[in-house]
Amino acid sequence: MISDVREAKQKEINEVLKQLDALTRMTGLPVYPEPKTGNPLWSDVRELDLRYQIPVKKISKFFEELKEGKVFATRCSKCGSVYFPPQDDCPRCRSSNLEWKEVQGEGELLTYTVISVKPPSFAHYPDYVVGIANFGDVSVTAWVDGPKEKIRVGAKVKLEVVKREPEGYITYKLILV
Ligand SMILES: [Zn+2]
């Protein structure tokens, strides 16, 4: 459950903060060695709780389709540029005339990387793979899943709508086929 994960994470954070407080009192500076590299890291002693809010009114179709298991990109009607995730205005030609285009079929994995050092908001996930795949003229960046032995540059992937746990929100993943 998400509440259990949050609680465990909070405990972990509190422990780190306690150590950081002790270190700051000793040295007068909130600087400590980063565990993996040993490089000095300055840590702000003020805590921020961030929750992003992004206006999505003009691209609400994207979320409606996601609920139906479909993934859509947008294409600028004026200059033909394709955007994924969808954009409601074309940064290239400033047009607000967009059309929807479903991302489907098989794509090709262009590159991937295993994420073992995670940003704090992703720290509760096991190591994951992020990749970029091309579906025709649509380029998709997403987590990659499927049989590990199949992962290589050039591998065939399909885009699948999945539920991300423990949060339980709907998102999309590249699945090795
Ligand atoms: Zn355009």
Image (cartoon, rainbow, N blue to C red):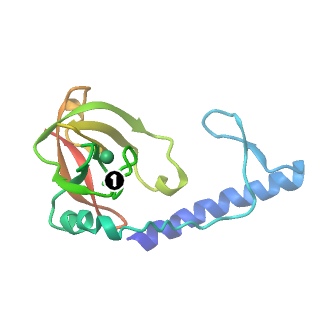
Q: Which three-letter amino acid code belongs to the residue tagged 1? A: Ser
Quadrant of the snapshot with the C terminus? top left
Question: Horizontally, is 92 left or right of 30 in the view?
Answer: left
User: Residue 68: x, y in percent?
Assistant: 15, 66
User: Residue 110: x, y in percent?
Assistant: 28, 30
Is residue 168 visible to us here?
no
The residue sitting at 52% across, 70% down in the picture is 7
Question: Horizontally, is 34 left or right of 133 in the view?
Answer: right
- Along the line of sight, the residue nearer the viewer: 137 or 163: 137
- Along the line of sight, the residue nearer the viewer: 171 or 7: 171
- Along the line of sight, the residue nearer the viewer: 10 or 59: 59
Q: Residues within 10 Å of mark 1 (few under 14, many from 20)?
A: some
User: Residue 84: x, y in percent?
Assistant: 30, 48
The residue sitting at 60% across, 67% down in the picture is 49
Question: Horizontally, is 56 left or right of 60 in the view?
Answer: right
The residue sitting at 26% across, 48% down in the picture is 78
Quadrant of the snapshot with the N terminus? bottom left
Mark 1 Cβ and ligand 1 under 8 Å apart? yes
The residue sitting at 34% across, 55% down in the picture is 87
Image quadrant assignment for residue 72: bottom left
Question: What residue did someone put label 1 on?
Answer: 95
Instruction: Give the secondary structure at mark 1.
Output: loop
Q: Residue furthest bottom?
A: 3
